[in-house]
Amino acid sequence: MPSPTIASAPISSTSTSSLVILGGGPAGSIAALTALREGSSVTLMERATFPKHKVCGEFLSPEIVPVLESVGVLE
């Protein structure tokens, strides 16, 4: 699997990826991880900056557990 690269600046117009995913939430992150494991070069773009400076609550439905296990991100 290729090593991920984190860019904090705008992507250059000369950058190439076989796949561009817009949105780094749970679905976009899992899609990017799956594509990387299959050998694709991936650009994952997220418009928000993290960490956020406000307290937010998050909820994952129990139905997502098998998906998280299948991609190896559930401990």
Image (cartoon, helix red, strand yellow):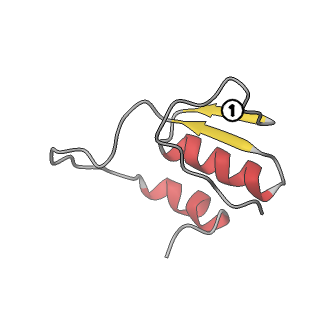
Expressed as whole percent of the image width and height from the top left, the position of residue 75 reads 49, 76
Seen in the image, is 10 located left or right of residue 5? left
Observer-nearest residue: 13 or 53? 13
Picture quarter containing residue 14? top right
The N terminus lies in quadrant = bottom right
When the figure is inspected, residue 34 is found, relative to residue 74, above or below; the finding is above
| Residue for point 43% across, 30% down | 47
Expressed as whole percent of the image width and height from the top left, the position of residue 25 reads 47, 42
Expressed as whole percent of the image width and height from the top left, the position of residue 22 reads 57, 30
The amino acid at mark 1 is Val
Seen in the image, is 65 located left or right of residue 53? right
When the figure is inspected, residue 11 is found, relative to residue 31, above or below; the finding is above
Residue placed furthest toward the bottom: 75
Of helix, strand and loop, which one carries label 1?
strand
Residue placed furthest toward the left: 54
When the figure is inspected, residue 61 is found, relative to residue 54, above or below; the finding is below
Count residues near mark 1 (Cα–Cα under 10 Å), then give few for <14, some for 14-19, many for 20+: some
Expressed as whole percent of the image width and height from the top left, the position of residue 6 reads 54, 50
| Residue for point 56% across, 61% down | 68
Q: In this figure, which residue is indicated by the disc labeled 1?
A: 20
| Residue for point 69% across, 61% down | 3
Observer-nearest residue: 61 or 74? 74
| Residue for point 52% across, 62% down | 65
